[in-house]
Image (cartoon, rainbow, N blue to C red):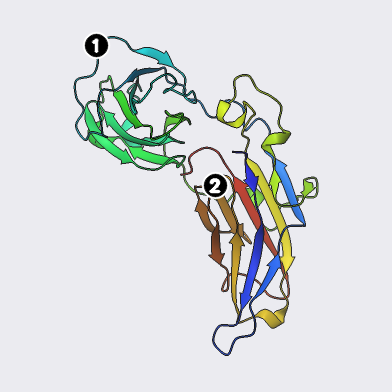
Amino acid sequence: MALSLFVASLLLGAPAPPAEPRRRIRFDDGWRFFVEPDSGRNQAFTPFKWQFHLADVDALVETLPPLPSEGWVETKLGENAFEGAGRRRFAWFRTEIGHPADGPKRVLQFDSVDDNAVVFLNGKKIHRHIGFGLPFSVPVTEAWNPQGPNDLVVLVENTAAGGGINGGVRFELPRAETTPKQALPGFDDRKWRSVHLPHDYVVEGKFDPQGDISHGTQPKPIGWYRKTFTLPASQKGKAIWLDFDGAYRNSTVWLNGEKLGTEPSGYIGFRHDISLKVKFGQPNTLAVVTYQLARD
């Protein structure tokens, strides 16, 4: 599926009965858009070397069984690991993640698995994940070996069609959360493009032979959207919701530099109550970023 920011709208209603009819203000026009340069190239892939083996199990196991001694093949994340697997629905992925001195402070960031997974480190289960296409983070402290090696094994369940680890996996320190400059009201976006929603920017990208095949081998860059709007002072005291039909994917929304929330999925709508956050009678700045990597 392409990266898209779909329809956003405002829902306006009185706080208590008797209520005037709810109003929906379309927010499809008046957006500024920008792609971060080079943010999409090869971002889906991992620096580790991975091996793959179909698994002779019929469920996501909680205890790591003896792994096959032979038959492992090198694989790249993002590929359909289950091609030609017939009815077999489970597969092992393994790699070695080293032993940096700050390793216990790091987390494994998974961008996406297709569909479910159990993560083991040095033979110990450290995480169970359910849900296709959802990023997740895994602390390693409880199973970390400071002298190394640190063997990472992931059992993936594929429920239908293609499957595997279809996003990047990185081993990194958690990032301190800050407000990006692009989300601040005073940021100058006059050089950004004007776009109308819904908008798909992946289809505008150039073919990349090293890109993720699930997106037509086109880059999946970071995309920013900004819009300025003003609500009349007469609307003060009413319940006001910012309503998105969808934003693909890992989107974060800010209003006047204040983070409203993050939505990892790109397949469902979401909303934010901005009744106590929006300004009346003066400009408001709405900023949205769509980001293919796991968010911290």
Please name the residue that numbered disc 1 is placed on: 69
Q: Specify whether residue 194 is in view.
A: yes
Q: Which structural element holds mark 1?
A: loop
Q: Which residue is located at x 25 percent, y 23 percent?
A: 56
Q: Which amino acid does label 2 sit on?
A: Gly
Q: Which amino acid does label 1 sit on?
A: Ser
Q: Which residue is located at x 60 percent, y 45 percent?
A: 290
Q: Is residue 52 above or below residue 203?
A: above
Residue nearer the viewer, 178 or 84: 84
User: Dividing the image into 4 quarters, which one contains the N terminus?
Assistant: top right
Residue nearer the viewer, 126 or 23: 23
Q: Residue 141 carries which label?
A: none
Q: Return the residue found at the far top.
A: 70
Residue 118 at x, y percent in the picture: 30, 34
Residue nearer the viewer, 221 or 149: 221
Q: Specify whether residue 102 is in view.
A: no
Q: In this view, does 235 lie to the left or right of 117?
A: right
- Of the numbered discs 2 and 1, the one sitting upstream in the chain is 1
When asked about the image quadrant of residue 207, the answer is: top right
Q: Which residue is located at x 28 percent, y 9 percent?
A: 70
Residue nearer the viewer, 184 or 210: 210
Q: Which residue is located at x 58 percent, y 90 percent?
A: 18
Please name the residue that numbered disc 2 is placed on: 266
Q: Return the residue found at the far front.
A: 87
Residue 53 at x, y percent in the picture: 33, 18
Q: Residues within 10 Å of mark 2 (few under 14, many from 20)?
A: many
Question: How many numbered discs?
Answer: 2
> Disc 2 versus disc 1: distance between alpha carbons?
39 Å
Q: Residues within 10 Å of mark 1 (few under 14, many from 20)?
A: few
Q: In this view, does 138 lie to the left or right of 229?
A: left
